[in-house]
Image (cartoon, rainbow, N blue to C red):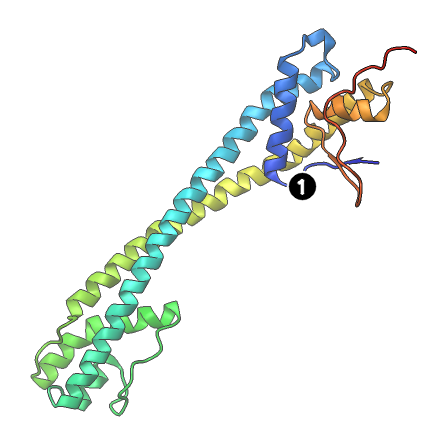
Amino acid sequence: MPFRSLPGSDAARSQALAAALKKSSEIAPENLPISAATAAALTSFVPRWEKEIAERADALGVQTTSTSALDAARTTLREHVSHFIQVYQLGVARGLFSPSGRASYELSVNEETVPALASEADLLTWASRIVKGDPRRSALHSEPAMAMPSAAEVDAALQHYEAKLAVQTTAKDALADEQSDVNDLRPAADRLIKDIWDEVEFALRQLDPPSLRRRAREWGVFYALRPGEPEEPTIEPPTQPPA
């Protein structure tokens, strides 16, 4: 036999509440299977719930967009930092730059490779060292400034990344606030849904179980099937004429 199952997700809660509100609007108040207090609570609660759900969805959209923009900025910055150090190391190999100039970027003077840039901290550290170190190296060793990319280009990529990071951080905090608002309302949503379902089933208790469930489903009541159980008809079977 199918059994009643309360909503386990916010989408299911929204569906249950919307179905109950729609059904209650189609019936005269004196004929409602739920109490006047429950009907009033439903009418006042659903707009609040839907507002918080919508605001959370909007915040998620903004956060998703800002995260994509941040990822793109991170990729650009990583390319600039990696290419800068690669080109600089090639310049050392050609004799354009002195090996000792590596120290201006806090690279080992004997290190010919590109340092690890996988972590956020490493990427920001090396970007900062490049921006500060290139003019220092150029002045200290009387060498040309780096190009393709230049330290200025690395700096521009770094500033772009930091701007996108600030936007994404704000969006992430806003999403967390909206999620908290939904979390705060969820217990009230669950209590209201349970009250509605309890009252609807009580009002329909004289019906046979399949008919009760068919009528209760109109109010958003959800009945889960046990393994192997067939779906129940959603339409009342026709009455058989007497023999």
Quadrant where the N terminus is found in the figure: top right
Q: Where is residue 213 in the image (x, y as percent from the top left)?
A: 78, 26
Q: Which residue is drawn at 32% across and 68% down?
A: 124
Q: Where is residue 6 in the image (x, y as percent from the top left)?
A: 72, 36
Q: Nearer the viewer, residue 75 or 195?
A: 75
Q: Nearer the viewer, residue 164 or 216?
A: 216
Q: Type of residue at label 1?
A: Gly
Q: Which residue is drawn at 35% across and 78% down?
A: 116
What kind of element bears circle 1?
A: loop
Which image quarter: residue 218?
Answer: top right
The residue at the far right in this view is: 243
Asked if 204 appears above or below 164 in the picture, the reply is above
Which image quarter: residue 49?
Answer: top right
Residue holding disc 1: 8
| Total labels drawn | 1
Q: In this view, does 86 lie to the left or right of 7?
A: left
Q: Residue at x 26, y 88 (%)?
A: 112
